[in-house]
Image (cartoon, rainbow, N blue to C red):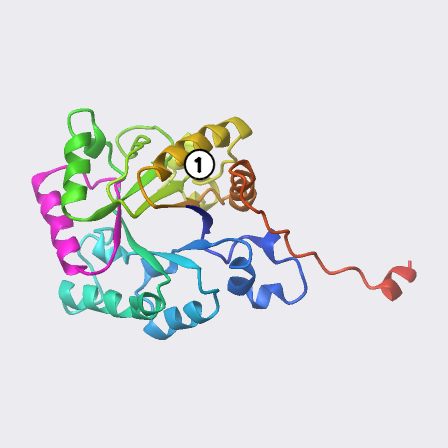
Amino acid sequence: MIQIGLAGWGDHDKLYASPGAAKNKLAVYSSLFPAVEVDSTFYAVQPERTLSKWTSETPAHFQFVVKAYQGMTGHTRGRIPFASEGAMFKAFRDSLQPMMEANKLAAALFQYPPWFDCTRDHVRVIREARARMAGIPCMLEFRHRSWFEPDMQERTLAYMRRDNWIHSVCDEPQVGAGCVPIVEAATDEKLTLVRFHGRHAEGWLSGSAPNWRDVRYLYRYSEAELAEWAERLLRLERLSERVIVIFNNNSGGDAADNARQLMAMLGQPVPPLPKPEEPDAEQLSLF
């Protein structure tokens, strides 16, 4: 099974053109896509009641990929608003309970930063993180090329299989060490994640710019690029029971269109978008 969705549900304006849709975005989104990536959990561990609300607003089959809090992946370089790392992990685990109980948690996504290279100390860090998350499915995404250099790729994948990490396969710009190549491999028989970050090389390197959010994921995949990925996804589907695909290329609002394109290519039903509100006839007559 291949399930296609987007990173977040709030910023895709074209999905919410119908009357009242803006007030019920998650309900509308979940009628159009079977899965979503939750990004707000990266910036703060959300209260359990928030994840409970999201769980209740979605259909029974719906799946959440929940991004791990940035303090858990080293993005804050050790500065955390918790008494200890143990307390931080416990708070995050507790917040996931409503989704786990409803069978709507696909996995927690641990995306490590671009400076997190393949060293003995960093292997220890991810081993400790996986131990703290025992009993919860977890996805692993690297942003440093050293993990998948030719002499390390198979060793990295073998480690992920041993520690029960679900592989996050990435499509992203190939610029310098702060990126990873497409590694078409599964490390879990039940699930593989694929994330589309776009291929805007200049934007990928704009992390220190004030407008980085506007340019980093500014990319629209072509028909040919998506067709190539459709074949790749079918191969990955033979390695895992389920493949969740997340489009994160939304700096220019392209994620939803590309996701729906790929759904059509794979022969999946593509639900019609809600129709925008018709202009009031009386108002039109004034002109």
- Which sits in the foreground, 211 or 259? 259
For disc 1, the marked residue is: 198
Where does the image place residue 17, in percent across and percent down from the top left? 65, 57
Q: Splitting the image into 4 quarters, where does residue 278 fall? A: bottom right
Can I make out residue 131 in this image?
Answer: yes
Q: Residue furthest bottom?
A: 49
Where does the image place residue 186, in percent across and percent down from the top left? 27, 39
Where does the image place residue 164, in percent across and percent down from the top left? 19, 49
Residue at 12% over, 43% down: 123
- Which sits in the foreground, 26 or 252? 26
Q: Is residue 101 found left or right of 215 in the rendered image?
A: left
Q: Which residues are magenta?
A: 114-142
In reply to whether residue 205 is colored magenta, the answer given is: no
Can I make out residue 208 in this image?
Answer: no
Q: Is residue 47 found left or right of 25 in the rendered image?
A: left
Count of numbered labels shown in the rendering: 1
Above or below residue 164? Residue 281 is below
In reply to whether residue 125 is colored magenta, the answer given is: yes
Residue at 31% over, 30% down: 181
- Which sits in the foreground, 284 or 132? 132
- Which sits in the foreground, 125 or 161? 161
Q: Splitting the image into 4 quarters, where does residue 208 fall? A: top left
Residue at 86% over, 64% down: 283
Task: Assign the C terminus to one quadrant of the image.
Answer: bottom right
Where does the image place residue 162, in percent across and percent down from the top left? 14, 44
Name the amino acid type tagged 1.
Answer: Gly
Above or below residue 184? Residue 105 is below
